[in-house]
Amino acid sequence: MRLRFKATHVVLAMLCVMYFITYVDRVNIGTAASEIQKELGLSNTQLGLVFSAFAYPYLLFQVVGGWVGDRFGPRKTLFWCGLIWALATIATGFVTSLLTLFIARVALGFGEGATFPTATRAMQYWTPANRRGFAQGLTHAFARLGNAATPPLIAALMAWLTWRGSFVALGLVSLVWGVVWALYFRNEPKDHPGITEAELASLPPRPLDERPQVPWGPLLRRMWPVTLTYFCYGWTLWLYLNWLPLFFKNNYSLDIKNSALFASGVFFAGVVGDSLGGILSDRILRNTGNVRLARLSVTVIGFAGAFLSLLPILFIHDITIVALCLSGGFFFAELVIGPMWSVPMDIAAKYSGTAAGLMNTGSALAAIVSPLVAGYVIDVTGNWYLPFLMSMGLLLLGGFSAFLMHPEKPFEELAEVNSVKRGVLAQELK
């Protein structure tokens, strides 16, 4: 008997693989950083600049990339993104200076900038509405699985191919993914040869306007609290992704293999957090029908739990306890992913790619500032704990700013209500 996979499940699986690969390509430099730093003679501040380099175009493309995904569809957009980030990863293996390394990482940002907003657009039409939290949690869990797998994977590849060869090998894998995606995926589910009528019936309908004109001003006003909340999350995320292997290596005098294992253990906690956050949010939504409760309850618990998990490192510096605290902090921080990436679809389903891009602008901005601040603080003070302690303030801010989000109020409905109010006011003034 031939085993047949549902087309919707295959698409979700391919997006999971994409999230895995992109995060391996983003954070591999953190594991290889000590060798790169030694060979190119970089300070921690210069290393922070390199870590943040991909985020400059990544920040730009959160909004532009979301718009591109909405206008041209996920099939073409993700194929070209995959091609660019694959070539940028390969080019990183051939850098010879701070400048060429910075340029290669900037190119990576151009390739990856549109990926997550465009993936949200793909999920918008390939995932049932009551499974959005699960889909977002699962795909981001694979991103964190990429985080967890990267340190030991890169350490092994470095032992086999050197750090330069590790980048070339990973870039080739990315190239293969892009080709497979373009061959399999279709922007319109009904155009896919392998989809069934039952699957189509479970999916949300496509709007008649295939290329909507984005109302930028009103959408920005609705999304800014979401962007701020995600900035607070992103600050902690990028601190972990960029500096954690070096934190264990330099603070506890571990070799690259052991520091990679400790970092991998911390990152694995994020895999569980991502998966659980989306599942919890969807379950609350199904049981209560309350979108605001489903999204905010998990998000606020995530921020509060991450803050409390990091508190003990103020007083205790034993490596085992610190690793457990950092793991707990990452687990709770990652709880917010599923509900947060569902919020753009809840608020602005018609413009979900653009709305997701606006939200992820917060993380992209954090990806620029967080590594630079951390590198500078470490160079000035020599204290590897301070950057993690600074992130606690952002976690508190994120927990409070989450209450300003209103996923229970769809953007289109508000636009219609405001339009009616303006019409009534105009009639009264006549």
Image: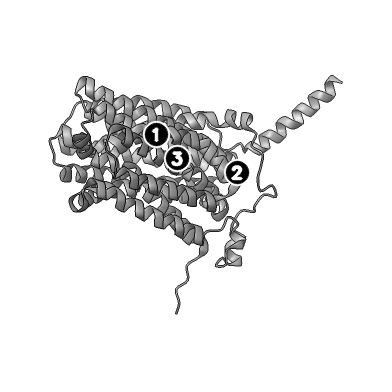
Above or below: residue 142 compared with residue 382: below
Q: Residues within 10 Å of mark 3 (few under 14, many from 20)?
A: many
Q: Earlier in the sequence, mark 3 or mark 2?
A: 3
Above or below: residue 148 compared with residue 106: below
Residue 192 appears in the rendering: yes
For the point 30% across and 36% down, the residue is 242
Q: Identify the element where label 2 is drawn.
A: helix
- Using the image as rendered, state which of residue 416 and residue 367 is in the foreground: 367
For the point 17% across and 37% down, the residue is 249
| Displayed quadrant of residue 229 | top left
Q: Is residue 345 left or right of residue 325?
A: right
Above or below: residue 1 compared with residue 59: below
The spot of residue 69 in percent (x, y) is 55, 45
Q: Is residue 208 left or right of residue 163?
A: right
Q: Which residue is mark 2?
A: 349
Q: Is residue 303 left or right of residue 319?
A: right
Kind of residue indicated by mark 2: Ala
Q: Identify the element where label 1 is drawn.
A: helix
The spot of residue 292 in percent (x, y) is 53, 38
Kind of residue indicated by mark 1: Gly
Tell me the quadrant of the picture where the C terminus can be found.
top right
Q: Which residue is mark 3?
A: 110
Q: Which residue is mark 1?
A: 234
- Foreground disc of the pair 3, 1: 3
Kind of residue indicated by mark 3: Phe
Separation of residues labelled 3 and 1 (CA atoms): 19 Å
For the point 56% across and 65% down, the residue is 195
Count up the numbered dots: 3
Separation of residues labelled 1 and 2 (CA atoms): 23 Å
